[in-house]
Image (cartoon, rainbow, N blue to C red):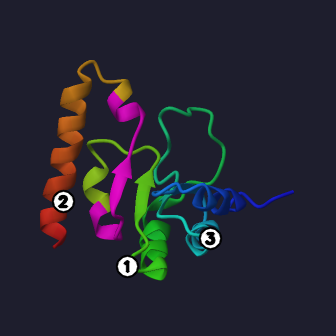
């Protein structure tokens, strides 16, 4: 059985220029970067609204901040899972490079407005944390 990060090597060999990896632990994120990933998502940061029956561990803000510090600069981390307009300001203080979300946009009646509000929340929190 191959490690999931083995696919990163195959993607590099195939000439894929930008490779992301979905990680659920610091060890998995480190392995992905060591294998050549361009960025990782760490999730879920908050309870995912699109997975109401999720029973796994919530990564949380403190572990996310710790992971970003350990992984260091040059290893972009995207916070994913349960991200919403109300909690996005908390992400910038963790050191993540960005965010990803599903439910906050796709469940909104006006998807463009939802995305605009998320980006506005991210931009405002980024300017405060700098």
Q: Mark 3 or mark 2: which is in front?
A: 3
Residue 74 shown left or right of residue 92 in the figure: right
97 over 50 or under it: above or below: below
Classify the position of the N terminus by image quarter: bottom right
Residue 45 is situated, as x and y percent measured from the top left of the image, at 47, 54
Q: Is residue 106 left or right of residue 42?
A: left
Secondary structure found at label 2: helix
Residue 57 x, y percent position in the rendering: 62, 54
Total numbered circles: 3
Which span of residues is magenta-colored?
92-105
Label of residue 125 in the image: 2
The image quarter containing residue 82 is top left
Instruction: Please identify the quarter of the rendering in which residue 29 is found.
Output: bottom right
| CA neighbours of label 1 inside 10 A, class few (<14), some (14 to 19), many (20+) | few
Q: Distance between the residues labelled 1 and 2?
A: 19 Å
Which label number is shown at residue 73? 1
What number is the disc on residue 96?
none
Labels 1 and 3: the sequence-earlier one = 3
**Mark before the other along the chain sequence, 3 or 2:** 3
The Cα–Cα distance between marks 3 and 2, rounded to whole angstroms, is: 32 Å
- The kind of secondary structure element at disc 1 is loop
Q: Where is residue 65 in the image (x, y as percent from the top left)?
A: 41, 71
Q: Which of 47 and 122 is in front in this view?
A: 122
The residue depicted at 53 percent of the width and 59 percent of the height is: 59
Q: Where is residue 94 in the image (x, y as percent from the top left)?
A: 35, 69
Viewer-side residue, 63 vs 16? 16
Q: Quadrant of residue 83?
A: top left
């Amino acid at each position: 059985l191959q490690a999931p990060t083995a696919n990163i090597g195959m993607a590099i060999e195939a000439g894929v220029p930008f490779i992301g990896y979905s990680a659920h632990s610091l060890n998995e994120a480190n392995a992905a970067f060591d294998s050549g990933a361009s960025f990782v998502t760490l999730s879920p940061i908050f309870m995912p609204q699109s997975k109401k029956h999720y029973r796994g561990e919530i990564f949380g803000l403190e572990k996310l901040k710790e992971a970003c510090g350990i992984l260091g600069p040059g290893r972009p981390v995207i916070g994913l899972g349960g991200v919403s307009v109300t909690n996005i300001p908390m992400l910038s203080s963790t050191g993540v490079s960005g965010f990803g979300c599903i439910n906050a946009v796709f469940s909104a009646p006006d998807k463009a407005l939802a995305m605009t509000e998320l980006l506005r929340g991210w931009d405002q929190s980024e300017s405060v944390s700098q």
